[in-house]
């Protein structure tokens, strides 16, 4: 009998996807903890909830968080803290989502 009906070689699309996943900093894992927490400017966490200090990347995600966690308090977009405007950027830190391997 022959093998399964699956090609034995990888396609160019699969190889390109693997290269992209390996060389793009998406801010995940232990290395991206500072990005997600919003400690430095350039991180994924741009907005901070004024009630519980949870961070979110955009206003829509913050509104979803607010509706789920604070349903009794009315949502006011002007009270959301913009962490990128408050904190100064650190030029030596690579920004998340930028092509280029960190392990060279």
Image (cartoon, grey):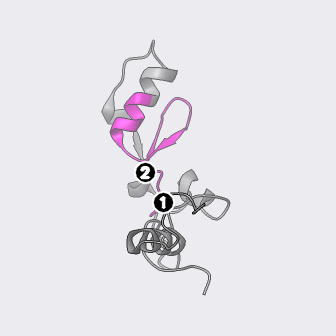
Q: Looking at the image, can residue 98 be seen?
A: no
Which quarter shows the C terminus?
bottom right
Give the residues in magenta. Answer: 42-64
Left or right of 92 in this view: 16? left
Q: Quadrant of the N terminus?
A: bottom right
For disc 2, the marked residue is 46
Q: In x, y percent, where is residue 50?
A: 48, 34
Residue 49 image point, x, y percent: 48, 35
Q: Quadrant of residue 85?
A: bottom left
Identified at 50% across, 62% down, the residue is 26
Whether residue 19 is situated above or below residue 87 in the rendered picture: below
Mark 1 neighbour class, 10 Å CA radius: few under 14, some 14 to 19, many 20 or more: many
Q: Is residue 57 magenta?
A: yes
Q: Position of residue 22 (x, y in %)?
A: 54, 72
Q: Secondary structure at mark 2?
A: loop
Q: Residue furthest top?
A: 72
Up/down of 70 relative to 32, above or below: above
């Amino acid at each position: 009998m022959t093998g399964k009906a699956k090609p034995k070689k990888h396609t160019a699309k699969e190889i390109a996807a693997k290269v992209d996943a390996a060389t793009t900093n998406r801010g995940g894992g232990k290395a991206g903890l500072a990005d997600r927490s919003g400690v430095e400017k350039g991180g994924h966490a741009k907005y901070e909830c004024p009630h519980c200090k949870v961070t979110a990347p955009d206003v829509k995600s913050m509104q979803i968080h607010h509706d789920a966690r604070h349903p009794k308090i009315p949502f006011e977009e002007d009270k959301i803290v913009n962490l990128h405007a408050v904190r100064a950027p650190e030029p030596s830190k690579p920004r998340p989502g930028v092509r280029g391997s960190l392990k060279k």
